[in-house]
Image: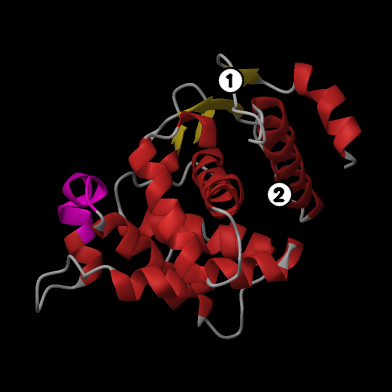
Amino acid sequence: MPLKTVLAWVGMSGLIGSAATAAPGETSDLEVTARLVHERHVFIARADAEGYRVCPAPQIKLADPASFGRFDPETNTVFVATWSRLSAAQRERFGSLAEHSGGGASAEAMFAEGTYGWVFVHELGHWWQACRKLTRVHSYGAEGGANRIALAFWREQDPELAARILDTFRYLQAAIASPVPAGMPKEQYLDDHFLLVAESRGYTWYQADMTLELAAESPRPSFHKALSQPLYPW
């Protein structure tokens, strides 16, 4: 969908929330919204094209949620963080990530690709779980299913972006110590201590480790296949 068309559609696309003022040179809320609306449109159109019954599209609210994204099933809303709402410390972390990537991307570009691209579609995966009435909040299965859907989506829509996300996850998996105690199955530990893990860097390790494991799945699941198993591996 052309950007002009997306911008024209913004006023009737289930968007809520107040605007934050972007500094000169930073991406505005309008531009972020246009990107997210487009990705939501493509995701839902693809699910429909695969023959699935789809539910009402989730609303989008620009905010500052933990982990940069959250789907609220009660209000059918995906909350998404924006660069303009980040703290100085959070921006510094993305600056360090950009330096380690070696690709010359700016800190904001690293944040945008990871959040407006990966995290947002991951949260659309949670929306899909709610749509299919297959939910298991705060569980390895729910996170695995959402990551599998997001990976299949980006491998289809933008393989280069998918590859960059996986490269970033490889770095993060190596840079962050595993929070899993020796001898404890990682799936069980996350299920038993989800909220504790979610408040630490261990959550990032889990997302990286889980997605890299899913990336090795052979044969690669299609978007249709990933949608068919909202909770994964169970």
- Residue 20 drawn at (x, y percent): 55, 20
Q: Is 45 drawn above or below residue 171 in the view shown?
A: above
Between residue 86 and residue 170, name the one nearer to us. Answer: 86
Work out whether residue 50 or residue 145 is closer to the camera in this orientation and state it: 145
Of the residues shown, which amino acid type is indicated by label 1?
Thr
Q: Quadrant of the C terminus?
A: bottom left
In the rendering, at what x and y percent does residue 140 appear?
Answer: 32, 59
Q: Which residues fall within the magenta stretch?
A: 190-200
Q: Position of residue 63 (x, y in %)?
A: 48, 26
The residue at the point 43 percent across, 30 percent down is 64
- Name the spot of residue 129 as percent of width and height, x first: 50, 46
Q: Quadrant of the N terminus?
A: top right
Residue position for label 1: 21
Residue appearing at x 52%, y 81% in the figure: 217
Circle 2 or circle 1, nearest the eye? 1
- Relative to 10, residue 118 above or below: below
Residue ID for mark 2: 52
